[in-house]
Image (spheres, rainbow, N blue to C red):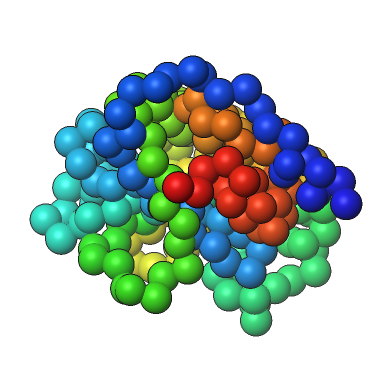
C-alpha cells in the first residue's frame, strides 16, 4: 500500500512550460526499470568519458544509451534470475553500495515494454547532467568501472554515488532522476508497479 500511495503523491514539477521536444523511454522488467536516453549530440557529450571505459557510445550503430541503477552484489551477479544467489539478494535487502549499468543499443524492437516520456530541452539537460554526476570517478578522473563481467559484450558497471537500500531501490532512483529533471512524478516508487502507476498518472500524454 505504501508503494502505491508513494507513487500517487507527486513531487513538485519545475514549472517549465516550454515545448517538449525530447523523448526518453522507461523500459519495464519483472523487478526493475531502466532509462533509455537517445544518443544525440547532447547525450554523447554528457557521457563522453564512458567511451574511455569501453562503453561505445560513439559507435555508428548506437542509437540509445541504457541506464540502470542497482545494488552492487545483486546487480552485478544476476544477469538472469536463474542465477539469483541468496547472499546477493540478502545484501541488497540490508543495503549495499550503488552501481550504475550503461549499455548501448541500436534500433529498438517494436514489442519493447517501454513508456515514452516527453521533456523540454532544459529538463533533458538536467536529467543527463544529474545522471552523469552520479558516476563515481577513479583516481584518473575517469568513470570508476567495476571489474566484473557485464550482461552483454557492450555494457559496463560503474561505481555510483549514494547507497542502495530497500527504501532507495532501482525504481526509487528512477523517480529521483525524473523529479530532479523537473518532471512531476511520485515521491516514492520502490516497485515497478509504482513507476508504472506514477507514469500513468503524471507523464502519460
Q: Report the residue that reaches farthest toward the top.
A: 15
In the image, residue 86 above or below residue 187: below
Residue 144 in the image, given as x and y percentages of width and height: 45, 37
Q: Report the residue that reaches farthest toward the right.
A: 1
Q: Residue sitting at 52 percent across and 31 percent down?
A: 183
Q: Residue sitting at 42 percent across and 19 percent down?
A: 16
Pick the residue in front: 21 or 154. 21
In the image, residue 28 above or below residue 25: below
Number of marks in the image? Answer: 0
Residue 199 in the image, given as x and y percentages of width and height: 57, 48
Please tell me in which quadrant of the rendered image residue 12 appears.
top right
Residue 32 in the image, given as x and y percentages of width and height: 61, 59
Q: Residue sitting at 65 percent across and 76 percent down?
A: 81
Left or right placement of residue 124 versus residue 100 in this view? left
Residue 189 in the image, given as x and y percentages of width and height: 70, 45
Q: Residue sitting at 40 percent across and 22 percent down?
A: 17
Please tell me in which quadrant of the rendered image residue 82 appears.
bottom right
Q: Report the residue that reaches farthest toward the bottom.
A: 82
Amino acid at each position: 500500500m505504501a508503494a502505491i500511495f508513494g507513487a500517487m503523491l507527486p513531487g513538485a514539477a519545475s514549472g517549465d512550460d516550454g515545448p517538449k521536444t525530447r523523448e526518453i523511454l522507461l523500459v519495464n522488467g519483472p523487478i526493475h526499470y531502466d532509462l533509455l536516453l537517445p544518443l544525440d549530440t547532447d547525450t554523447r557529450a554528457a557521457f563522453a568519458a564512458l567511451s574511455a571505459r569501453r562503453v561505445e557510445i560513439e559507435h555508428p550503430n548506437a542509437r540509445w544509451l541504457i541506464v540502470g541503477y542497482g545494488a552492487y552484489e545483486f546487480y552485478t551477479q544476476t544477469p538472469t534470475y536463474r542465477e539469483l544467489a541468496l547472499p546477493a539478494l540478502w545484501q541488497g535487502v540490508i543495503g549495499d553500495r550503488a552501481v550504475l549499468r550503461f549499455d548501448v543499443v541500436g534500433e529498438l524492437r517494436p514489442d519493447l515494454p517501454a513508456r515514452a516520456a516527453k521533456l523540454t530541452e532544459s529538463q533533458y539537460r538536467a536529467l543527463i547532467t544529474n545522471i552523469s554526476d552520479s558516476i563515481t570517478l577513479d583516481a584518473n578522473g575517469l568513470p570508476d568501472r567495476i571489474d566484473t563481467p557485464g550482461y552483454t559484450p557492450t555494457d559496463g558497471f560503474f561505481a555510483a554515488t549514494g547507497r542502495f537500500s530497500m527504501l532507495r531501490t532501482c525504481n526509487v532512483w528512477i523517480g529521483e532522476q525524473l523529479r530532479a529533471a523537473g518532471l512531476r512524478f511520485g515521491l516514492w516508487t520502490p516497485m515497478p508497479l509504482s513507476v508504472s502507476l506514477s507514469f500513468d498518472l503524471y507523464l502519460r500524454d
